[in-house]
Image (spheres, grey):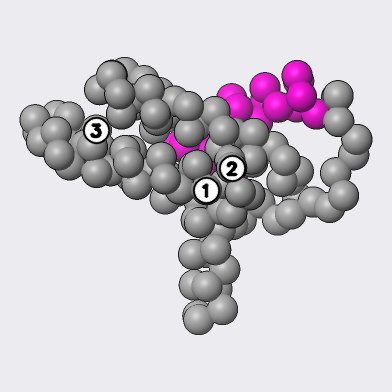
Amino acid sequence: MIDPRGQRFAATITTLVLAVVLLTGNPWLLLAQAAFFAVGVLAGPASTPYAWLFRAAVRPRLAPPGELEPAEPPRFAQLCGLAFTVVALLGVVAGLGVVTTIAVSAALAAAFLNAAFGFCLGCEIYLRIRRAG
């Protein structure tokens, strides 16, 4: 179980990082974000550098969370983010700037929805897949 505020905090940083990538085209920053997503997929969302920063610097200043949420939906959301950043990186390698732009924009839109509105698109997709299957 994880603190949902940590996921929103991570989404805020991810939004900023992906916006910078979109504006600058920096492949190294994109690679770093992809690596952070990979950590979230492999070790769980509570193991990412953004989660560590939240636990160390933000959570001690907040009241305890009203509720915790299962880690599986955010982990799936991390997988979605990883997929989009890998496609974006492949676009960089192949010299297909339009592919990179579209993939980064999609990941940015999903991260922004979570950061600004608390709506985790990847989590919702995960829940719909679980209900359907």
Tag 3 residue: 89
Q: Earlier in the sequence, mark 3 or mark 1?
A: 3
Judge whether residue 13 can be spotted in this image: yes
The image quarter in which residue 91 lies: top left
Which residue is at a point 56% across and 58% down the rendered structure image? Answer: 123
Percent position of residue 4, x then y: 71, 46
User: Above or below — where is 129 with respect to 11?
Assistant: below
Report the predominant secondary structure element of the magenta stretch. helix
Determine the residue positioned at 67% across, 22% down.
53
- What amino acid type should be assigned to the residue bearing mark 2? Ala
Circle 2 sits on which residue?
A: 116
User: What are the residue bounds of the magenta stretch?
Assistant: 36-59
Residue 38, position in %: x, y?
45, 37
Q: Position of residue 126 (x, y in %)?
A: 52, 64
Q: What mark, if any, has residue 113 been given in the picture?
A: 1
Reading the chain from its start, which is encountered first: label 3 or label 2? 3
- Report the amino acid beneath label 1: Leu
Residues at marks 2 and 1 touching, judged by CB atoms closer than 8 Å: yes
Q: Amino acid at mark 3?
A: Leu
